[in-house]
């Protein structure tokens, strides 16, 4: 089964979770941090996003009495890998070659970029 990536809104919440100082956080705490960033969502909206993120295997929660405490179960590197695979699957039939072909011959990929890519491939064989 193809892993589902985080939506743009879910990524905003995930950013809060990945950048927090503590190990876990409540929905109210997430809401307060988002509001500091100018994002005003109600508790129910954030809870809905967190439920979806849990279904996608991005976060988990622990319930203590009547409060849920959320924490990420992936890190930034895992997120990048997961999102990269989703990008390849969605737009390039899972092919890195198809992905690179979209840039080769366009103004997007310079000769310097191609040389960096050659060095990277050579060093990772």
Image (cartoon, grey):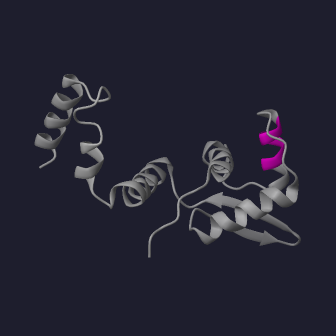
The residue shown at (19%, 31%) is 114
Coordinates of residue 35 in the picture (x, y in percent)? 83, 38
In the picture, which quadrant includes the N terminus? bottom left
Overall secondary structure of the magenta section: helix
Q: How many numbered markers are drawn?
A: 0
Coordinates of residue 22 in the picture (x, y in percent)? 69, 48
- Determine whether, in the image, residue 63 is placed left or right of residue 119: right
The residue shown at (24%, 24%) is 110
Quadrant of the rendered image containing residue 85: bottom left
- Determine whether, in the image, residue 95 is placed left or right of residue 22: left
* Identity of the residue furthest to the bottom in this view: 1
The residue shown at (78%, 41%) is 34
- Determine whether, in the image, residue 90 is placed left or right of residue 103: right
Coordinates of residue 70 in the picture (x, y in percent)? 71, 60
The residue shown at (44%, 70%) is 2
Per the rendered image, the range of residues in magenta is 30-35
Quadrant of the rendered image containing residue 73: bottom right
- Determine whether, in the image, residue 28 is placed left or right of residue 4: right
- Residue placed most toward the observer, 101 or 56: 101
Q: Determine whether 108 is above or below 94 in the image.
A: above
């Amino acid at each position: 089964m193809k892993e589902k990536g985080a939506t743009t809104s879910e990524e905003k919440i995930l950013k809060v979770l990945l950048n927090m100082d503590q190990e876990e956080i409540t929905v109210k705490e997430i809401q307060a941090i988002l509001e500091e960033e100018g994002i005003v969502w109600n508790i129910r909206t954030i809870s809905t996003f967190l439920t979806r993120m849990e279904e996608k295997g991005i976060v988990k929660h622990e319930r203590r009495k009547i409060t849920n405490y959320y924490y990420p179960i992936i890190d930034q590197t895992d997120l990048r890998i997961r999102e990269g695979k989703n990008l390849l699957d969605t737009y390039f039939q899972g092919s890195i070659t198809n992905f690179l072909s979209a840039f080769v011959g366009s103004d997007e990929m310079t000769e310097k970029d191609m040389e960096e890519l050659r060095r990277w491939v050579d060093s990772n064989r």
